[in-house]
Image: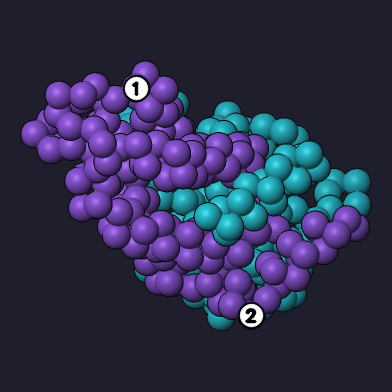
Chain colours: A purple, B cyan
């Protein structure tokens, strides 16, 4: 038994995981929280991306959009990560071999790196942009990649059920 | 961000191991609607779990050999609303399970109809999975 499978087994058999797995109501309720968290996070990220691309919120600069929605993005992230961790723990031993789950984790890593790039480099230069200055092509590419990556994360997540 | 990194790395490790496992899925992803089967056997294990429940029965074949079969059904909430509670069955009970064989040939069936020890018959199927008898399935002609 590998170390990972031992850790997963312990996680799966823990009292909290077992209770959630065998629950009548908590499981679908936490699934609902997960969807709400994803909606808040991916929805607000998409607003920023579309603003950077010049598709939405054209009358305000991206810096303002980021400042407006970032708390919602973080709240959504917190809900999604906590509910997601609980749902994973409850099903861990039966689900960790699921190709779509693994794909989702890899996509989350890439999308997360894109977020870090945005906040460490792009966002610093964003303050200087105005409605007359077009964002650099690299920034637009990052925004387009963000839209695509989060859509793929959601698709991979949904496909866990169709493995 | 650290948490997300951690999950990503865990995913990458899991990817490298590529462990086969049962998971949440639709009917047609796993079962063959052209292969109905009836199992009669003694209950050996209960997994009253989301998103699917599993129970295991020892079935004696024609050659006298006993084979343990996994029977998959809906989650605890759906079964409970149909009047099937975890306490209704106990290890050693004899169950009659009408279901469908797995496409893979594995010893697992989709338990669409379960006859409990007290004679009650419950629909064990997962709602909305598109399998035979699923009330939400489109009338494709294949389903009976």
Check the residue under mark 2 and report the chain it is in: A
Q: Residue furthest left?
A: A59
Q: Nearer the viewer, residue A14 or B61?
A: A14
Locate the C terminus of chain A and report the quarter of the image it occupies: top right
- Rendered view: B7 above or below B136: below
User: Residue B33: horizontal and vertical position, in percent?
Assistant: 55, 32
Q: Nearer the viewer, residue A38 or A93?
A: A38
Could you tell me which residue is drawn at 42 percent across and 63 percent down? Answer: A78
Neighbours of disc 2 within 10 Å: few (<14), some (14-19), many (20+): few
Could you tell me which residue is drawn at 64 percent across and 42 percent down? Answer: A102
- Which of the numbered marks, if any, corresponds to residue A136? 1
Could you tell me which residue is drawn at 69 percent across and 48 percent down? Answer: B9
SS for callout 2:
helix
Check the residue under mark 1 and report the chain it is in: A
- Which of the numbered marks, if any, corresponds to residue A80? none
Q: Nearer the viewer, residue A84 or A139?
A: A139
User: Residue B19: horizontal and vertical position, in percent?
Assistant: 77, 44
Where residue B44 sits, quadrant-wise, is bottom right
Q: Taking the image as drawn, is residue A58 in sight?
A: yes
B99 to the left or right of A63: right
- Please give the residue where the numbered disc 2 appears in the rendered image: A15
Q: Residue furthest top?
A: A137
Distance from disc 1 to disc 2, alpha carbons, whole Å, reads 52 Å
Look at discs 1 and 2 and give the one toward the viewer.
1
Q: Residue furthest front?
A: A128
Neighbours of disc 1 within 10 Å: few (<14), some (14-19), many (20+): few
Q: Nearer the viewer, residue B4 or B143?
A: B4
Locate the N terminus of chain A and report the quarter of the image it occupies: bottom right
User: Residue B3: horizontal and vertical position, in percent?
Assistant: 57, 59
Q: Taking the image as drawn, is residue A154 in sight?
A: no
């Amino acid at each position: 038994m590998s170390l990972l499978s031992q850790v997963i087994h312990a996680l799966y058999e823990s009292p909290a995981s077992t209770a959630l797995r065998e629950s009548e109501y908590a499981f679908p309720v936490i699934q609902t929280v997960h969807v709400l968290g994803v909606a808040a996070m991916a929805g607000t990220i998409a607003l920023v991306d579309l603003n950077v691309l010049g598709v939405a919120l054209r009358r305000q600069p991206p810096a303002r959009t980021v400042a407006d929605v970032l708390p919602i993005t973080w709240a959504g992230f917190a809900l999604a990560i906590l509910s997601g961790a609980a749902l994973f723990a409850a099903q861990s031993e039966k689900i960790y071999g699921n190709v779509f789950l693994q794909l989702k984790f890899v996509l989350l890593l890439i999308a997360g790196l894109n977020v870090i790039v945005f906040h460490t480099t792009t966002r610093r230069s964003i303050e200087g942009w105005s409605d007359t200055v077009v964002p650099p092509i690299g920034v637009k590419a990052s925004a387009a990649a963000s839209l695509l990556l989060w859509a793929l994360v959601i698709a991979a997540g949904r496909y866990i059920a169709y493995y | 961000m650290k948490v997300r990194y951690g999950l990503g790395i865990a995913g990458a490790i899991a990817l490298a191991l590529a462990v086969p496992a049962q998971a949440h899925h639709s009917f047609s992803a796993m079962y063959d609607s052209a292969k109905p089967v009836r199992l009669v056997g003694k209950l050996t294990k209960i997994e009253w779990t989301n998103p699917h429940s599993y129970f295991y029965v020892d079935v004696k074949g024609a050659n006298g050999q006993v084979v343990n079969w996994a029977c998959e059904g809906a989650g605890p909430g759906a079964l409970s609303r149909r009047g099937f509670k975890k306490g209704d069955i106990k290890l050693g009970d004899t169950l009659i399970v009408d279901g469908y064989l797995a496409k893979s040939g594995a010893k697992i069936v989709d338990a669409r109809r379960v006859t409990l020890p007290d004679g009650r018959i419950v629909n064990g199927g997962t709602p909305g999975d598109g399998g035979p008898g699923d009330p939400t399935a489109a009338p494709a002609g294949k389903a009976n």
